[in-house]
Image (cartoon, rainbow, N blue to C red):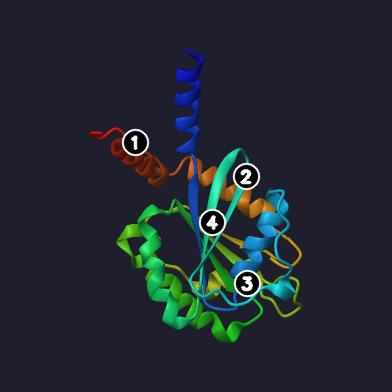
């Protein structure tokens, strides 16, 4: 009997793994963010910023935040790689979109990429966390200034937040991660993905 209940408990908790996409144009600091989160939330020391190279394809990181297992998919942001992003949308519970807040000359490219992400039907209702990264640099704009520039008119009622962070020194990352877990917990999208996973798991053997 114990083994039966343990099996059910293990099965239930394995379904609580939440998939988070880390998107943004190249050089925004996505991989630096992932490595800093690994350092902050797991026993694994992330790569130092000076050893991080541009992502070609996918980096995967696993951490636990507020008793939730998170799997991060960090995807390359070069123009030729952005077409790969949509292959991961269907399974994503939420999106982190990273912007280099110290480089206003690339805001237009970031805005265009983000708008394309938000229009995709496979991401409908996914909570969105937009990070104004590189706050350790004096020229970085605030999260409020970035929000005004991006001017996101239509977010189909999705939960979203702008947050000022530094993936280099960790500023704002803990608050951002905890907000994301809270909104994913009550998101209709998370509920839909869990129901779908349950339906697939209970299909004919």
Q: Which of marks 2 and 4 is nearer the N terminus?
A: 2
Which x, y percent locates residue 88? Answer: 40, 61
Give the residue displayed 23% in from the left and 34% down from the top.
Answer: 204
**Residue 33 point in image, percent of width and height:** 64, 64
Q: Residues within 10 Å of mark 4 (few under 14, many from 20)?
A: many
Q: Is residue 125 visible?
A: no
Q: Marks 3/1: CA distance? A: 35 Å
Quadrant housing residue 118 = bottom left
Considering only vertical position in the picture, is 135 above or below 64? Answer: below
Instruction: Single out the mark in the foreground, 3 or 4.
Output: 4
Mark drawn on residue 198:
1
Residue at image mark 4? 72
Distance of mark 2 from mark 1, alpha carbons? 23 Å
Marked residue nearer the N-terminal end (3 or 4): 3
Question: Nearer the observer, disc 3 or disc 1?
Answer: 1
Which comes sooner in the sequence, label 3 or label 2? 3
Q: Where is residue 26 in the image (x, y as percent from the top left)?
A: 55, 78
Could you give the CA–CA distance between mark 3 and mark 4, rounded to whole angstroms? 14 Å
* Label 4: which secondary element: strand
Question: Dot 2, how many residues are within 10 Å of its Cα: few (below 14), some (14-19), or many (20+)?
Answer: some
């Amino acid at each position: 009997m114990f083994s039966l209940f343990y099996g059910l408990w293990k099965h239930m908790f394995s379904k609580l793994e939440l998939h988070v996409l880390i998107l943004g144009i190249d050089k925004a600091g996505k991989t630096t963010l992932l490595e800093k989160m690994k350092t902050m939330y797991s026993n694994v020391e992330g790569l130092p910023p000076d050893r991080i190279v541009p992502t070609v394809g996918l980096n995967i990181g696993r951490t636990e935040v507020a008793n939730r297992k998170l799997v991060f998919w960090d995807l390359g942001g070069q123009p030729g790689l952005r077409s790969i992003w949509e292959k991961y949308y269907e399974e994503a519970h939420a999106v982190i979109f990273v912007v280099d807040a110290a480089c206003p000359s690339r805001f237009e490219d970031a805005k265009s990429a983000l708008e394309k992400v938000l229009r995709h039907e496979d991401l409908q209702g996914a909570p969105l966390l937009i990070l104004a990264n590189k706050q350790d640099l004096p020229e970085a704009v605030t999260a409020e200034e970035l929000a005004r520039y991006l001017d996101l008119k239509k977010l189909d009622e999705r939960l979203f937040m702008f947050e000022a962070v530094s993936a280099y020194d960790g500023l704002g990352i803990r608050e951002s991660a905890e907000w994301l877990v809270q909104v994913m917990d009550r998101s209709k999208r998370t509920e839909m993905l869990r129901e779908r996973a349950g339906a697939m798991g209970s299909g004919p053997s």
